[in-house]
Image (cartoon, rainbow, N blue to C red):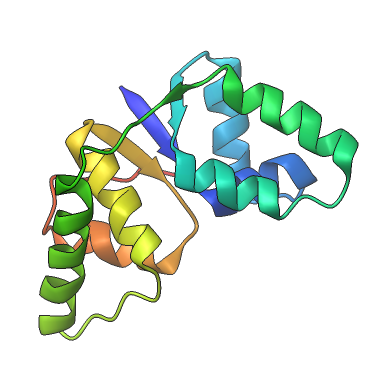
Amino acid sequence: MRILVDTSVWVDFFNGHPSPQAETLAHLIREETDVVTCGLIVSEVLQGLRQAKSRVNVERHFREMDWLSPKEPDTYIEAADLFRRLRARGITIRSTIDCVIANLAAHHDALILSKDRDLTLIVESKLLALRSVPV
């Protein structure tokens, strides 16, 4: 099973910030689980790095991973539809990016590892065939 790790978990992991999700990620890496990423997550992680030296190492790490690719334009149209369907249920997602990431994971049959409130709400909505990694 592939695991799509969200930005918040990578930030904790790379910064050595203890969290259950970062510990789960470390375990998945040690066990050589199929951890995957996507362009939006890599962009968010890299833009937050302050030191060039760290950036080179993190970038190298991401380049070695498998990447989930969007199916254009469907991924983006479906993300907008997901946003609207959630809003109709009274759930407001703060970032379109989370809707895109959730759609990518669902379409690629990947589990989500996240600390993000909005991704949790998306998973719990059951509007997508999407599951979280138990932490």
Number of labels in the image equals 0
Foreground: 31 or 65?
A: 65
**Residue 87: which quarter of the image?**
bottom left
Q: Is residue 89 visible?
A: no
Up-down relation of residue 28 to residue 40 (above or below) = above
**Residue 105: which quarter of the image?**
top left
Q: What residue is at 25 percent from the left and 62 percent from the top?
A: 122
Q: Residue furthest front?
A: 73
Q: What residue is at 28 percent from the left and 38 percent from the top?
A: 70
For the N terminus, the image quarter is: top left
**Where's residue 116, x and y in %?**
46, 62
Q: What residue is at 34 percent from the left and 49 percent from the top?
A: 101
**Where's residue 135, x and y in %?**
46, 45
**Where's residue 76, x and y in %?**
23, 54
Q: Residue furthest bottom?
A: 90
Q: What residue is at 55 percent from the left and 50 percent from the top?
A: 7
Q: Is residue 27 visible?
A: yes
Foreground: 29 or 4?
A: 4
Up-down relation of residue 16 to residue 98 (above or below) = above
**Where's residue 95, x and y in %?**
40, 70
**Residue 80: which quarter of the image?**
bottom left
Up-down relation of residue 11 to residue 79 (above or below) = above
Q: Residue furthest top?
A: 32
Up-down relation of residue 66 to residue 50 (above or below) = above
Foreground: 20 or 126?
A: 126
